[in-house]
Image: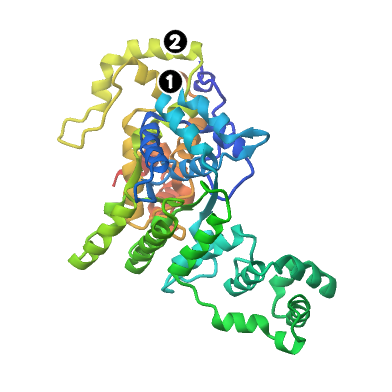
Amino acid sequence: MQLKNLFTKPVSRPIEGVIKADDNASLRLEIEEYVLTNEVAKRLEGFLDAYNNYEGANGVWISGFFGSGKSHLLKMLALLLDNREIDGTKALELFLPKCADNEILRGDLKRAATIPSKSILFNIDQKADVISKTQIDALLSVFVKVFDETCGYYGKLGHIAQFERDLESRDLYAPFKTAYTRIANKPWDKGREQALLESQNIAKAYAEVTATPESNAIGILDKYRNQYRVSIEDFAEKVKMFIDRQSPEFRLNFFIDEVGQYIAENVKLMTNLQTIAESLATKCRGRAWIVVTSQNDMSTMLGEMNKQQSNDFSKIMARFSTRMLLTSTNVAEVIQKRLLSKTDEGAELVSDLYHREVNNFGTLFRFTDGSREYKIYRDRDEFVRSYPFVPYQFDLFQSAIENLSRHNAFEGKHSSVGERSMLGVFQQVAIHISDYEIGQIATFDLMFEGIQTALKSQTQRSILAAQRQLNNDFAVKLLKALFLVK
């Protein structure tokens, strides 16, 4: 029998390997395909306990290596706390069956979903399109931008958003938009994008609704631009005012993807993040949360610091006291459940294979020269779950990815970001070997194909040359495996 006939679902089906925070196209599928592993369930219990019983810390730090499912988890949290309706069904209803017999988690999720809230979910690099990281308030500018957009104002230019906010505070925003549409013959949503060209129409509409002479209203946006300043305290105050206008229990939660790479090695941005979280905690008293993802856990992120910085960062550690670390065990479980689950007949055949070959595993997968120990199949169940992969491949591939990124092998904005998740790579390998007969396994060199498109060309030059010049498939395979473990 061929390997492709062992699996419950076709391995070549489209699986969204990389989850994008701001992509709303297939939310239902993303929730249904989400695998709630034992590890994530434990982490969720800790987070929900903190969220439901606020005790001063309003920050959550989700960390894990490339492709470990951080963005997917972040997105699930944003949907669940918002309890958004997706195709006529509430997110919580779609998610609860995954909790199985975990009554504590079910109860905590239900309680969290009943707290009225609004989730602001974004990828920080995409939202910071025109903001330079070297600017002292780069991080704050992104927060202000997404908050303004959530309020319905023009986030791209803060001074215009402030102009709109001031009009709204005087109940003049709606009349202004109506007057502008009549005068300029176009909606305000379009006009504000061309504010420089529209200054005359803006002045006329503003003069009309505020009952001031038009000469006073000329250049009103220029005045706003000159006076516009952004500070963390003002931002926290605006968030508090927004929350106070909603129901008494209401919460506004910020979910920020890939914040770790954005602030990496920039002490100023790191302390800014801490101050934003602190100000929101002080002003909003647990009604504004910040949940971020990062490639590295917080202690790695902070790295080697002098004593003064250590004191600064002890504060950020306290603020982001809820930490959710995703490990390769979690990824292995996701891949086994989403990609490698077997039909009843397939499981029987693989079980027979286990009994035939179990005595050979030590010879095949144990190395005796003092090299690093990697686990092999513990028992028949693990063999059935993992086949045609070997358990050590999950850990070894994770190490390979982490060290390649450390040596700056990947293309892209951040050295640690490849464009495929672990699930995507393992799916590609499974498709490649789907015509193999049962009894064969996935070799480690095949993982190279999964990340090849994300690697810089100079780092893989020797392999490309070998593929052109060597008429020896085995030599090229060996070279790929060596490249990954080097």
Q: How did the renderer colour the structure? A: rainbow
For residue 267, above or below residue 253: below
Q: Name the residue under label 2.
A: 348
Q: Which residue lies furthest to the left in this view?
A: 370
For residue 126, above or below residue 64: below
Residue neighbourhood size for the residue with mark 2, other residues' Cα within 10 Å, grouped as few (<14), some (14–19), many (≥20): some
* x 76%, y 80%: residue: 211
Comes first in the chain, label 1 or label 2: 1
Residue 339 position within the rendered picture, expressed as x and y whole percent measured from the top left: 49, 28
Residue 7 position within the rendered picture, expressed as x and y whole percent measured from the top left: 51, 21
Mark 2 secondary-structure assignment:
helix
For residue 379, above or below residue 245: above
For residue 22, above or below residue 395: below
Residue 135 lies in quadrant: bottom left
Q: Which of 412 and 258 is in front in this view?
A: 258
Mark 1 secondary-structure assignment:
loop
Q: Of discs 1 and 2, which sits in the foreground?
A: 1
Residue type, numbered disc 2: Glu
Q: Nearer the viewer, residue 315 or 351?
A: 315
Q: Can residue 450 be seen in this view?
A: yes
Q: Distance between the residues labelled 1 and 2?
A: 27 Å
Residue 291 position within the rendered picture, expressed as x and y whole percent measured from the top left: 43, 50
Q: Which of 376 and 107 is in front in this view?
A: 107
* x 54%, y 78%: residue: 228
Residue type, numbered disc 1: Asp
* Disc on res. 451: none
* x 51%, y 28%: residue: 96
Q: How many labels does the image show?
A: 2
Q: Nearer the viewer, residue 59 or 261?
A: 59
Q: Name the residue under label 1.
A: 101
Q: Is residue 339 visible?
A: no
Residue neighbourhood size for the residue with mark 1, other residues' Cα within 10 Å, grouped as few (<14), some (14–19), many (≥20): few
